[in-house]
Amino acid sequence: MASSVMSTSNTATASPAVSTADLRKSYGDKTVLDGIDLRIPAGTVFALLGPNGAGKTTTVQILSTLIAADGGRAQVAGHDVATSPAGVRAAIGVTGQFAALDDLLTAEENLLLMADLLRLGRREGRKRAQELLERFGIADVAKNRAATFSGGMRRRLDIAMTLVGDPKVIFLDEPTTGLDPRSRRTMWETVRSLVAGGVTVFLTTQYLEEADQLADRIAVLDGGRIVAEGTADELKAQIPGSHVRLRFDDIDEFERAATAFPGAARDDENLALRVAGDAGIDALRALFDRLDAAGVRAADFSVHTPDLDDVFLALTGEGTSAHPLHVKETLR
């Protein structure tokens, strides 16, 4: 589920929080980004997916002014990345794959150090640090050194430090890497609360469930290019992978069902058939009508619709001929 919903008209007319046009980057003869076009509305979560080495981190580094692009244009929070890098840096926060904390300092001291680096002033810095300690649920351990924190707490403190400067856009580069499932879900709630407060989040992740849960829009990056972009549901709808798995207790019934659905994928060991196609109510009714006509009764059935795993495999060239996408038999 996406963290926020914007009307179509607002999305279309509002100035984007992040935009790129023909963004390119190479290292020697290796092309990392080969013409990236993005338009990310303010107050949304945008997820960039892709296999290792696809260029996700390079994209974040360019947009956060850490490295320069070889070509194309990019704007963040109304500032051109190439001509106004100081303006970009003043408007953003960046959290990398590993927490950037000083383990010798307490949680409060880490936040105050960031406030000093941003020249907020002593009184304002202390006020901001206290607000963030409360907001991220770490006020009770504010005097504890960061070295004593769990992975999830370190991540929360890291994002709190990112927010000291009250950024308009936050780049989260694989923020839940190495976290346990409970800490990951806590991080998701943190991201949702940021967006509810008007912040734009640019998220890179290898956890497909994470993108599915958080992102308003998702782009899939592969071979230096955006190969697909849309909502999670829009991306799933592009993949013809819906199917019903029918299991039988009797070998004779299994064989009669296989005759009724000659194009279905067989699992002889488990006496199961995988019948691909639309898995809606009308299609299911048609499927069971065909079983009845063949005098066959299934022991049980399950419905599978494409998820982001299927999208990722199909769009990044990771699939195989055994993948459900290649099953052609229809339910109708």
Image (cartoon, rainbow, N blue to C red):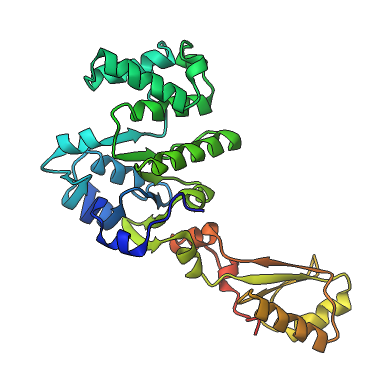
Rendered residue at 51%/15% (across/down):
141
Image coordinates for residue 31, horizontal then vertical, percent: 26, 52
Image coordinates for residue 27, horizontal then vertical, percent: 24, 45
Q: Residue furthest left?
A: 83
Image coordinates for residue 142, horizontal then vertical, percent: 46, 14
The quadrant the C terminus occupies is: bottom right
**Frontmost residue, 261 versus 172:** 172
Q: How many marks?
A: 0
**Frontmost residue, 282 versus 314:** 282
* Residue 100 appears anywhere in the view: yes
**Residue 255 figure quarter:** bottom right
Q: Is residue 316 above or below residue 134?
A: below
Q: Is residue 317 above or below residue 187?
A: below
Rendered residue at 24%/43% (across/down):
62
**Residue 108 figure quarter:** top left
**Frontmost residue, 181 versus 157:** 157
**Residue 81 figure quarter:** top left
Task: Give the side of residue 52 with respect to residue 212, left or right.
Answer: left
Image coordinates for residue 160, horizontal then vertical, percent: 39, 27
Task: Give the side of residue 78 with respect to residue 188, left or right.
Answer: left
* Residue 30 appears anywhere in the view: no
Rendered residue at 50%/40% (across/down):
188
